[in-house]
Image (cartoon, rainbow, N blue to C red):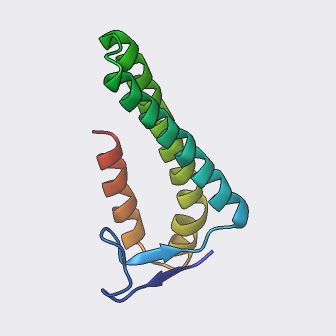
């Protein structure tokens, strides 16, 4: 697993780093996101069909729970791989980055 610096032309909107994931991690993350995407489409359909508010809210809560689960899995892998490696290499700024991310997740 490696993180690399990207140039502004090749980086995404939110980060200057990338991470190579194992095929299994990649598959698991995409499967979770596909399920969440399907749930969101289902909620959209409920709104379009004028479903009852509480029914929509229950489904929206399920999407929030699924996103929280996705975040937990991604965060655990990040700590086990990237953060651990960077600490071993003396890159203590990674701890600051982790603290910032945790603060954002806990809002």
Image quadrant occupied by the N terminus: bottom right
Residue at x 44%, y 36% (from the top left corner): 41
Residue 102: x and y, percent? 37, 49
Image quadrant occupied by the C terminus: top left
Residue at x 36%, y 72% (from the top left corner): 93
Residue 43: x and y, percent? 40, 28
Residue at x 46%, y 38% (from the top left corner): 68
Q: From what the image shows, is residue 3 above or below residue 102?
A: below
Residue 29: x and y, percent? 59, 53
Please, which residue is most extreme toward the front here?
49
| Near-viewer residue (26 or 42) | 42
Number of callouts in the render?
0
Q: From what the image shows, is residue 16 above or below residue 78?
A: below
Picture quadrant where residue 77 is located: bottom right
Residue 87: x and y, percent? 51, 71
Left or right: 18 as drawn, with respect to 106? right
Q: From what the image shows, is residue 49 above or below residue 94?
A: above
Residue at x 33%, y 40% (from the top left corner): 106
Left or right: 19 as drawn, with respect to 24? left
| Near-viewer residue (10 or 86) | 10
| Near-viewer residue (31 or 84) | 31
């Amino acid at each position: 697993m490696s993180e690399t610096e990207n140039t502004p032309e090749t980086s995404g909107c939110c980060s200057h780093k990338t991470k190579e994931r194992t095929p299994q991690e990649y598959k698991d993350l995409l499967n979770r996101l596909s399920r969440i995407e399907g749930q969101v489409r289902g909620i959209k359909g409920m709104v379009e069909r004028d479903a009852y508010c509480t029914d929509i809210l229950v489904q929206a809560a399920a999407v929030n729970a699924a996103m929280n689960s996705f975040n937990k899995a991604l965060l655990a892998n990040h700590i086990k791989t990237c953060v651990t490696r960077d600490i071993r290499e003396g890159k203590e700024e990674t701890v600051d980055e982790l603290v910032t991310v945790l603060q954002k997740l806990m809002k």
